[in-house]
Image: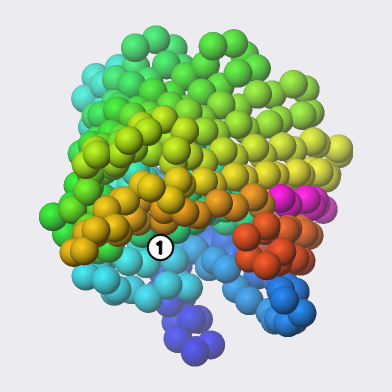
């Protein structure tokens, strides 16, 4: 295994070195590993783990053609009828005009949530509505238009994040990324998403980031409605995520809370029915999760980070968990 890993890294480095002069602007590897332990119903579990080991490539082919590639070495290369299972990003962007761009390939589904938009290596605890999506990154096409400075509207047609692999389930997203004031950034979307039980779901996602000096808080809200007959279209299938950080020198002090709820009536439970319309958060589910911890950057940059977090989940028999770990990054090439 070690020899295979070293071979992959060496081959990647050789390829990058060969083409970097013309096409690569940034190439690096990052990894997150640690030790986790939990206590649930009197049963203790603990062990070391590696969450992520990624190779990143960013570059350009011409002045108006750029690309991004991120590949995980900690995932199976092929699974669930998905030949790009281990590849998060593999997209190319054409900057057609100063205000309009077209992106094609595997890229994030355009959900308007800061938790969803964050690099996964920087998220330690997820809401169930985000954590249990079948796919975060799917094949598709996105057009983006800058309506004003720092105000972008995008329309995306892609594979559905509620389906496994490449299927005939699709997602249609209208996404707005902008700001109202210097301290309030927004990422909002309306999504219509097919799932594998034959139901189309409507997502209304409102992501908000408030920054006041060294203090930052993300407040995300998701409302989900099944278009097949959900009686209460608002507030019966929802998620709320609050994530705050306070920076003190090389430390980030962190608090996070998530709440997921889906009414027990949101489904077809008749004989032969499909069951819960929401395949991510099933009907009748309710959970509150709270987490607290810190991040420490001893070098003063993102090349080395130490972290420790405690979390509690209300629905899993009051599960208590502690995570301690390290994240590091090393550059393979960076254009100056």
| Residue segment shown in magenta | 290-298
Q: Is residue 275 visible to the viewer in this orientation of the structure? A: yes
Quadrant of the rendered structure where residue 85 is? bottom left
Q: Who's the residue at 21% across and 42% down the image? A: 228
Q: Who's the residue at 48% across and 81% down the image? A: 5
Please name whichever residue, 212 or 312, is drawn nearer the observer in this view of the structure: 312
- Relative side of 128 to 204, left or right: right
Neighbor class of circle 1 (other Cα within 10 Å; few <14, some 14-19, many 20+) is many
Q: Who's the residue at 33% across and 21% down the image? A: 153
Please name whichever residue, 301 or 250, is drawn nearer the observer in this view of the structure: 250
Residue 114: percent from the left, percent from the top?
A: 53, 37
Q: Who's the residue at 60% across and 73% down the image? A: 50
Asked if residue 322 is positioned above or below residue 265 in the image, the reply reads: below
Q: Residue furthest left?
A: 168
Asked if residue 56 is positioned above or below residue 59 in the image, the reply reads: below
Question: Is residue 295 within the magenta segment?
Answer: yes
Please name whichever residue, 307 or 256, is drawn nearer the observer in this view of the structure: 256
Residue 81: percent from the left, percent from the top?
A: 21, 70
The residue where tag 1 is placed is 71
């Amino acid at each position: 295994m070690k020899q295979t890993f070293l071979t992959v890294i060496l081959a990647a480095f050789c390829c990058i070195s060969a083409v970097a002069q013309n096409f690569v602007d940034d190439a690096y590897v990052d990894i997150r590993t640690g030790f986790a332990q939990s206590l649930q119903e009197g049963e203790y579990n603990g062990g070391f783990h590696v969450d992520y080991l990624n190779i990143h490539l960013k570059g350009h082919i011409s002045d108006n053609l750029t690309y991004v590639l991120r590949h995980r070495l900690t995932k199976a290369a092929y699974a669930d009828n998905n030949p790009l299972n281990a590849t998060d990003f593999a997209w190319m962007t054409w900057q057609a005009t100063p205000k309009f761009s077209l992106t094609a390939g595997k890229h994030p589904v355009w959900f308007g949530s800061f938790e969803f938009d964050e690099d996964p290596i920087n998220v330690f605890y997820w809401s169930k509505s985000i954590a249990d999506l079948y796919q975060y990154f799917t094949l598709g096409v996105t057009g983006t238009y800058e309506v004003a400075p720092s105000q972008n509207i995008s329309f995306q047609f892609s594979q559905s994040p509620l389906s496994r692999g490449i299927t005939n389930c699709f997602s249609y997203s209208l996404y707005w990324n902008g700001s109202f004031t210097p301290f309030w950034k927004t990422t909002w979307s309306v999504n219509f998403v097919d799932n594998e039980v034959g139901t189309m779901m409507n997502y209304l996602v409102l992501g908000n980031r408030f920054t006041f000096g060294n203090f930052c808080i993300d407040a995300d809200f998701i409302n989900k409605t099944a278009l097949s007959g959900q009686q209460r279209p608002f507030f019966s299938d929802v998620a709320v995520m609050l994530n705050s950080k306070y920076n003190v020198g090389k430390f980030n002090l962190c608090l996070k809370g998530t709440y997921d709820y889906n009414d027990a009536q949101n489904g077809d439970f008749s004989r032969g029915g499909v069951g819960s319309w929401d395949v991510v958060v099933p009907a009748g589910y309710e959970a509150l999760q709270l987490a607290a911890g810190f991040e420490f950057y001893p070098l003063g940059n993102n090349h080395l980070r130490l972290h420790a977090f405690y979390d509690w989940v209300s629905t899993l028999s009051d599960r208590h968990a502690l995570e301690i770990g390290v994240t590091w990054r090393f550059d393979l090439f960076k254009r100056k």
